[in-house]
Image: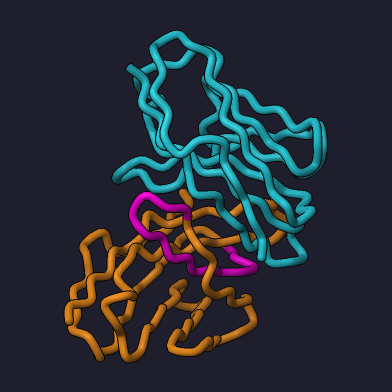
Chain colours: A orange, B cyan
Amino acid sequence: SQKIEQNSEALNIQEGKTATLTCNYTNYSPAYLQWYRQDPGRGPVFLLLIRENEKEKRKERLKVTFDTTLKQSLFHITASQPADSATYLCALVSSGYSTLTFGKGTMLLVSP
Amino acid sequence: DVKVTQSSRYLVKRTGEKVFLECVQDMDHENMFWYRQDPGLGLRLIYFSYDVKMKEKGDIPEGYSVSREKKERFSLILESASTNQTSMYLCASSFPTSGGMTQYFGPGTRLLVL
């Protein structure tokens, strides 16, 4: 069956360090992979999209990698700040489908 | 900036009541979605619509219906609310697949059914 797995345990890091979050998937052929940020009690906010033929994408302090052989995406936040504390969701769009499938998210806590 | 608004942030209803949740987007998006989000279960798709008067079932449509009479508005209806429908409800909109299906979410409605 299709599965998207994100680490359910919260990631605790110190301010200034690089946070790395993982998204693994099975039985998907994603055309796109996306990352969203969600703050408590709010809707998710889109951050980055990476296509199946792209290895890496950057936006300011954010970097996403996509390895279709390993069936894995890594999401990095460099020089992390307490304001980066939130839950981060990955989402896949499979070829020929019109909906996103979301992982359950990983909570990131950045302490000063 | 895309704006997706939802009619209520918090709602308390009684078992058996008919509940309407409304969502409006201002970016002329074709696609609109309703999700519910529960602790440990993540975001689950209830219904979506890719055009006016069109609707498709998502993963958990039971107990829900939807209406899309205008492009900008997508309503979720709980015909007879039950306690297991207590949840956070999120609406989203997007352009069609060619845009990568990036979704823009509303602020959510936290529904409590007593």
Taking A56 as reference, is A19 left or right? left
Residue A73, x across and y down, in percent: 45, 75
Does A28 appear above or below B110? below
- State yes or no: residue A36 in magenta: yes
Does B71 appear above or below B112? below
Residue that sits furthest to the top in the current view: B16
Taking B45 as reference, is B55 left or right? right
Q: How many badges with numbers are in the image?
A: 0
Does A42 appear above or below B35? below
Residue B100, x across and y down, in percent: 68, 66
> Looking at the rendering, in which quadrant would you find the C terminus of chain A?
bottom left
- State yes or no: residue A40 in magenta: yes
Write the residue at 66% across / 66% down.
Answer: B1
Does A66 appear above or below A11? below
Write the residue at 79% across / 34% down.
Answer: B54
The answer to which image quadrant residue B13 occupies is top left
Boundaries of the magenta span: A29-43
Q: Nearer the viewer, residue A102 or B18?
A: B18
Write the residue at 64% across / 82% down.
Answer: A53
The answer to which image quadrant residue A83 occupies is bottom left
Residue A3, x across and y down, in percent: 43, 54
**Main secondary structure type of the part rendered in magenta:** strand
Write the residue at 59% across / 77% down.
Answer: A50
Residue A76, x across and y down, in percent: 38, 83
